[in-house]
Amino acid sequence: MEILSILGTLIMLILLQVVLGFDNLLYIAIESKKAPLEKQSMVRKLGIGIAIFFRLLLLLFLIKLIEKFENPFIIYESDILSLNMNLESLIIILGGIFILYTSVKEIWHMLHFEENITEQKNKSVTQTIVMIVIMNLVFSFDSILSAMALTENNYIIAIAIIIGGILMIIAANKVSAFLQKNRMYEVLGLFILFLVGVMLISDGGHMAEMKIFKQEISAMNKSTFYFILIILVLIDIVQTKYQKNLLKRQNQS
């Protein structure tokens, strides 16, 4: 019975890694495109591989430093802004701001494609891998903390992190290939990333008990996030199909 319980917990943790890792996977697929074409697959695999190692280190540090992550070290209060920010909320807010910046910048590049095409290819392999690893760690906080809430067995969490990372390596190339063949969905991916950035900032603000003009910042509900995500995908699918049918009719006439 104990083996079945451990196996059930492991499966649950792997599913948790997969579900919470979707936004991370999307970021990796878009970020890796900045590396030279022939090295993009290697960048994704190496970036995720290094990130798995750092995720395991993060698990160890979180176990030992959980109190330091929970205790606020930036405390500020005024009529305009008040907060009690700990290290975890600070990292999540900064990660959210960076993702917002990245998504807006990439959308801007797509609107000015010809002007910025050379700029898009200037990022080195090392820079791209570093960004993938850093953002992977930012995305890791919620999945690792959620896993720690489900079980106290750190070995099972570590195994789930490794298996989840391997699945992410396998899926990363498929997601990137899909976006490459269906460039119209890249815009959808960028808007989803924008939404992820907003969600991270709201989560971090809620953790920090942040108030702006005495109005408390509430965390975006995960079900709300996935509902908006589904609506965005459906709108994009319907719009794409409509445009194809419209072009087909125009060609026939």
Image (cartoon, rainbow, N blue to C red):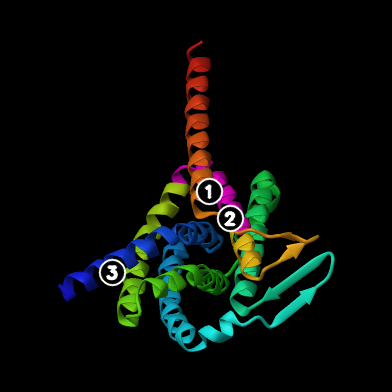
Which residue is disc 2 drawn over?
220
Which residue is disc 1 drawn over?
224
Report, in whole angstroms, how far the alpha carbon at label 3 lies from the one at label 2: 27 Å
Report, in whole angstroms, how far the alpha carbon at label 3 lies from the one at label 1: 26 Å
Which residue is disc 3 drawn over?
9
Q: Earlier in the sequence, mark 3 or mark 2?
A: 3
Q: Name the residue: 64% across, 78% down.
A: 86
Q: Name the residue: 50% across, 54% down.
A: 222
Query: Type of residue at label 2?
Result: Met
Q: Name the residue: 49% across, 68% down.
A: 142
Label 1 neighbour load within 10 Å: few <14, some 14-19, many 20+: few
What residue occupies the far right of the structure in this picture?
79
Identify which residue, 112 or 57, lies in the foreground: 57
For residue 95, above or below residue 33: below
Which stretch is magenta?
180-198
Name the side, left or right, on which 186 lies relative to 159: right
Name the side, left or right, on which 70 lies relative to 173: right
Q: Name the residue: 53% across, 48% down.
A: 224
Judged from the image, the secondary structure of the residue bearing numbered disc 3 is helix
The overriding secondary structure of the stretch rendered in magenta is helix
Label 3 neighbour load within 10 Å: few <14, some 14-19, many 20+: some
Identify which residue, 187 or 247, lies in the foreground: 187
- Residue 220 counted in the magenta span: no
